[in-house]
Image (cartoon, coloured by chain):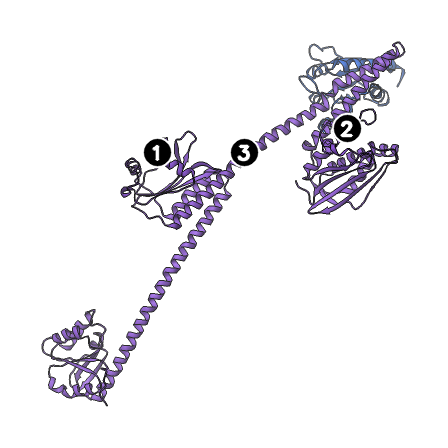
Chain colours: A blue, B purple
Amino acid sequence: MNSADVVKTVEILLVEDNPGDIRLTQEVLKEGRIQSRLNVVEDGEKAIAFLNRIEPYLHAPLPDLVLLDLNLPRRNGLEVLRMIKTNETLRHIPVVVFTTSQAKEDIKNAYNLCANCYITKPIDLEQFVRSVKSIEDFWLTIVKLPQE
Amino acid sequence: MSQNPVSKGTILVVDDTPTNLEVLFDFLSNAGFKVLFAEDGESAIEKANYAMPDLILLDILMPGIDGFETCRRLKESELTRSIPVIFLTALTDIVDKVRGFSLGAVDFVTKPLHYEEVLARVETHLRIQALTQQLQAQNELLEHEVQERKQAEAALQRQNQRAQLFAEVTLKIRQSLQLDEVLRTTVTEVQNILQADRVLIYRLWPNGTGSGVAEAVQAGLPHVMGQTFPEEVFPDETRKQYRQGRMRKLEDVEHDQAISACLVEFLKQFWVKAKLVVPILTKHELWGLLIVHQCSGPRRWTEFETDLLQQLANQIGIALTQAQLLEQETLQRQELSRSNAELQQFAYIASHDLQEPLRMVTSYLQLIERRYKGQLDADADDFIQFAVDGAVRMRTLINDLLTYSRVGTQAHPFERMSCSKAVENAIANLKVAIEENQAVVTYQDLPELEADSIQITQLFQNLISNAIKFRGRVQPQVAIEASHQDDVWRFAVKDNGIGIDPQYAERIFVIFQRLNNRVDYAGTGIGLAVCKKIVERHGGKIWVQSELGKGATFYFTIPDGGKA
């Protein structure tokens, strides 16, 4: 990481319809070391609009990381994932599937659609915090991603 | 040559100059023959007709009709045809011997007669004649016997043919689960076997009306199919008889005094002259009738025919019952697969939707704990702890329920698997509990089975886990054994734990049933219910033998080879 990057705010897109989870994620990220901005959309349709900068997201930033729930209203998480991974300008963005589902089918389908990783939301807060911090750590500091 | 007391036969001598023949007469008489004379052809024919001689000596040259013509006439007549004729001819006569033979003569003798020769020829021809007749009689007898045998054979063949046809029809009926096909097959085959003019399967509908549902009818005769008949067609009495399984036989509709005029009228519509009706019963319900009509004329129904029809009606009844059962089963299967699909949906919901609110409860309680610890009093900390415990327990419960529902919905096909391997895996999964309790798990002589290895592992795991969980004060010891008896493997999982009061021996396999308090023994009460479900899916049984304080032995059976 060079000095120029330190000041840059990391853009995270959280696709999540559960306000409890949204807040929890916000709380955990607040405690983190990295300066990040959490952009939240509550359904798959909005996620697609946000990523493609369609009204009302004309000036939305291109996220550095997508946290994607699967069980979403309108367009589900797998549809959003497919859209991202088949789009030239979006496919490089790491997508972390972050969901309650432990269903084998969901896990298989997510990886088949090139999810970068699949994490089941832990029931315990401590573990939840650890998971989110791990995501933050791994994808935003350890991993080297392509620069715009 | 002496006179024979019994005549050696009658000889008719035909000659227009009898004086020449006195010597012949004496000679033949002396040789034991009865001799008759005729002086011309016509009287010879007359005498031959009433005296029926055994042989005729016939002169050729005679006034009136000559010998050839006489011979021709004799041979023409049925009565005298077989009498051998020997022509008498003068040496000087130029006669056509070939013509004589072609007219049916057997021989010629030349005049003047050499009597010894005549006698020799006569005797030879009589012998030939006798032999011929004997042969003919034997032939006739033989032919008769052959005829009889042929008839018997034909009858047997007919019977065999019918038996075979019956077997074929029965097979077709049995094999076909399509009702329409059964009925069509039956009418066609019955018409073939009985050579009947019309064979009909008549359905009696629940509302009392009826209609033909299958028909095989001789070309040119009116069809009964497609018409619906009112309830009145069958009087109550007839209907009652049919319901009792009795057949109805009419051999001559027009001359039967027992049947009502209106029925005769009704039957006339369809040209029925004779009929045979057998009820078709399914499980004591009068489903319909198997009807055979003869339209060409009255018909006497043989016992064979009525038996055949009765048996076929029985077969149709069985086929119908089978078809009804199949239909029921298909419906049940559809219902089952629908409810299975629902259960699967439930399982998904349980794994996802139910856990989300639970996670919220836990997480936010913990967030409160984390942020405000020390700012609340001791009671508050306790309360939070209870709430978190409850949520954790709820999650375990959901997961266990999920396991229970998956025994049926996420089952794997049975394949050859090793029970020792399953036990090893179960022990590996229970490593922590086994080490914490310093438990000893032993197993020996476990077989290979056709089974769902994941479920069998789960089964052993639950039983071993229980054996350790409900331990006594001493070191837990779990022994697993198997023995083969009557096509099943019987497994025993024996422990030295706290045991079970025998009065609860059955209740423990019911879902959510718990015998012990939560503080000492954690658990959801689903483990043994899962065990029971797994064993039952494999076609086996599970039970427990135990006494309080004396350990428990859980037994279960799995059929040898497994049952899919």
Element at label 2: loop
Q: Mark 3 and mark 2: span between their CA atoms?
A: 41 Å
Against B85, residue B396 (above or below) is above
Badge 2 amino acid = Leu
Q: Which mark is residue B556?
A: none
Badge 3 amino acid = Gln
Q: Nearer the viewer, mark 1 or mark 3?
A: 1
Q: Nearer the viewer, residue B285 or B336?
A: B285
Answer yes or no: are tags 2 and 1 on the same subunit.
yes
Badge 1 amino acid = Val
From the viewer's perspective, tell me whether residue B298 is left or right of residue B410: left
From the viewer's perspective, tell me whether residue A101 is left or right of residue B278: right
Q: Mark 1 and mark 3: span between their CA atoms?
A: 32 Å
**Residue A85 in which image quadrant:** top right
Answer yes or no: are tags 3 and 2 on the same subunit.
yes
Q: Which mark is residue B328?
A: 3
Q: Mark 2 and mark 1: span between their CA atoms?
A: 69 Å
Q: Nearer the viewer, residue B208 or B70?
A: B208
Against B8, residue B332 (above or below) is above
Q: Chain of mark 2?
A: B
Q: What is the crowding at mark 2: few (fewer than 14 residues within 10 Å), some, or many (at least 20)? A: few
Q: Which mark is residue B233?
A: 1
